Image: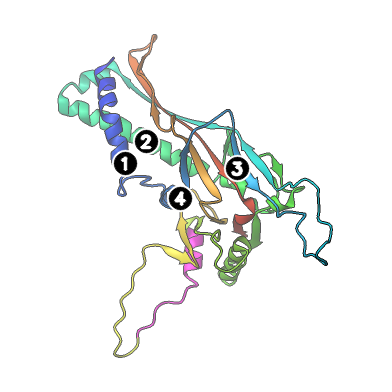
Amino acid sequence: MSVVSQGISVSYNAVVNANKKAANQWADSSFLTELDRQGGIIHRAFGEQLEVTLDYQRNQGAAFLSSDLQTVATTKTEVVTSAVYDIAELCVPMVWSKKDEVKNSSDSQKVALVNAIITNGLSTHDDMLEQYIFATTTNGFLGLTTHIADAGTGSDGGIDSSIETWWKNKQSTYIDDTDIEATFTTVFNLCSKGSGSKLMPTLMVSDGATQALFEGTQQANQRYETQDMKAGFKTLMFKTAKYVFSQYGGTRVLFLNPKNFQLLVSKDYYKELSESLEFTNANGFSRKIYSAIQTVTNNRSRLGVAHV
């Protein structure tokens, strides 16, 4: 094993743990940062496919009785189904040459090179997740556009919401700053289905320009005589939802709750570091960061989008 590869073996877990601290984890991945903070990144064992159990309708035999001996339904109770997802894979190769090892021969140089390779690999991993989570499908990895469609329809997890209408996500449109807040209220209420719901949206995301468009509609604090008011805000809110923006977001404002939308990651193969491989036809080495992952929803009717 090369000197750099040995250094990576020793340092990898330390760098991963350092990047999990609040100051570094998902450093430029604001949506994944908040999703993680709210418990929406789930480590679990993977099988051949990822199955999510759905309680999709109330008991169809339930009824108010017209008399004490009224006949009740004896048909089989059908209230549970499942959405099924394939596993997606993300791989980040870390490659260096024997010449790199020659040029970084001292201990301090080796440590700097090793940390740079690992940190860049982890940052690349997280940045690609942040980018493609706003897409539709990328080589089997499902983005938010699959789970939250502008029309509310489409197939997700093997369930076609054009046929199974209970699987439709919520949606509404806005034109500009004159109606964006009203549209947010519409979508939020549709997703909530009732005041005080435990499944109301807790996270919203778009690009920065759209967030700024909404923020500009909010009334500023007023200062009155004899009253000194101090206020500061770290995160924009709409009702109970934190509204963050991502460099990869767009004008589609997405509403979700991490109880209903999750990024599942393999507990055995998430940011897993491979063994070192020396190239047979070149003077270099490679190690890989590998993740088995997928985004899923267990209640698509609680997800929503406000779009133009």
**Which of the marked residues, 3 or 2, is nearer the chain's N terminus?**
2
Residue at (30% x, 32% y) in the render: 13
Query: Mark 1: which amino acid?
Result: Asn
Where is residue 103 drawn, in percent x and y? Answer: 21, 21
Segment colored magenta: 209-223
Residue, disc 3: 136
Residue 184 versus residue 47: which sits nearer the camera?
47
**How far is disc 3 from disc 2 in space, using C-alphas?**
23 Å
Residue, disc 1: 19
SS for dot 2: helix
**Which of the marked residues, 1 or 2, is nearer the chain's N terminus?**
1
Where is residue 115 drawn, in percent x and y? Answer: 26, 32
The answer to whether residue 174 of the structure is visible from this angle is: no
Instruction: Report if residue 107 lies within the magenta region.
Output: no
**How far is disc 4 from disc 2 in space, using C-alphas?**
18 Å
Residue at (15% x, 23% y) in the render: 106
Crowding near the residue tagged with mark 2, few <14, some 14–19, many ≥20 C-alpha atoms within 10 Å: some
Residue 232 versus residue 260: which sits nearer the camera?
260
Crowding near the residue tagged with mark 1, few <14, some 14–19, many ≥20 C-alpha atoms within 10 Å: some
Residue at (25% x, 29% y) in the render: 113
Mark 1 in CB contact with mark 2 (< 8 angstroms): yes
Residue, disc 2: 122
Depth check, mark 3 against mark 1: the one in front is 1
Please tell me whether residue 205 is drawn above or below residue 25 in the rendered image: below
SS for dot 3: loop
